[in-house]
Image: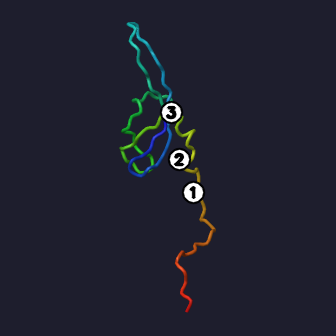
Amino acid sequence: MPFECRGCWHVWQEDYVVRHTEDDHGNEADVWLRAGLRVPPPSSGAICPQCGCQQATTFPDGYLRRHPELIPPAEPRGPDATPLLSPVPRPLY
């Protein structure tokens, strides 16, 4: 499930396994598992792994596959070799 931090705008994804169960009385329930451990369902109160902010929002499942530009690169980019040019003309004198 994709998340976005409202503090630093970091985007990340957490994988869950959802098991749909039914008890002896016909009551249905969902059990959420992460790394094999039972966890509460993901919510907008997720904690950002980058800044620790507790205000995050979720996206619909599959959102990041349709918007790969939101996924940060695994390694930081190197410096851009393009020289910076000022839009202000130099004085002629």
Question: Is 38 rendered above or below residue 14?
Answer: above
Image spot of residue 60 (x, y percent): 48, 34
Q: Amino acid at mark 3?
A: Asp
Q: Earlier in the sequence, mark 2 or mark 3?
A: 3
Q: Tell me the residue that label 1 is attached to.
A: 76
Q: Amino acid at mark 2?
A: Leu
Q: Tell me the residue that label 3 is attached to.
A: 61
Q: Tell me the residue that label 2 is attached to.
A: 70
Question: Is 41 rendered above or below residue 4?
Answer: above
Q: Quadrant of residue 26?
A: top left
Left or right: 70 as drawn, with respect to 46: right
Q: Residue furthest top?
A: 25
Q: Residues within 10 Å of mark 3 (few under 14, many from 20)?
A: few
Image spot of residue 83 (x, y percent): 61, 72
Question: Is 73 rendered above or below residue 28?
Answer: below
Q: Which mark is residue 51?
A: none
Q: Earlier in the sequence, mark 2 or mark 1?
A: 2
Residue that appears at 41% across and 51% down:
51
Image spot of residue 42 (x, y percent): 41, 33
Q: Residue furthest bottom?
A: 93
Callout 2 touching callout 3 (CB < 8 Å): no
Q: Nearer the viewer, mark 2 or mark 1?
A: 2
SS at circle 3:
loop
From mark 2 to mark 1, how far is it between C-alphas? 15 Å
Callout 2 touching callout 1 (CB < 8 Å): no
From mark 3 to mark 1, how far is it between C-alphas? 26 Å
From mark 2 to mark 3, how far is it between C-alphas? 14 Å
Q: Nearer the viewer, mark 3 or mark 1?
A: 3
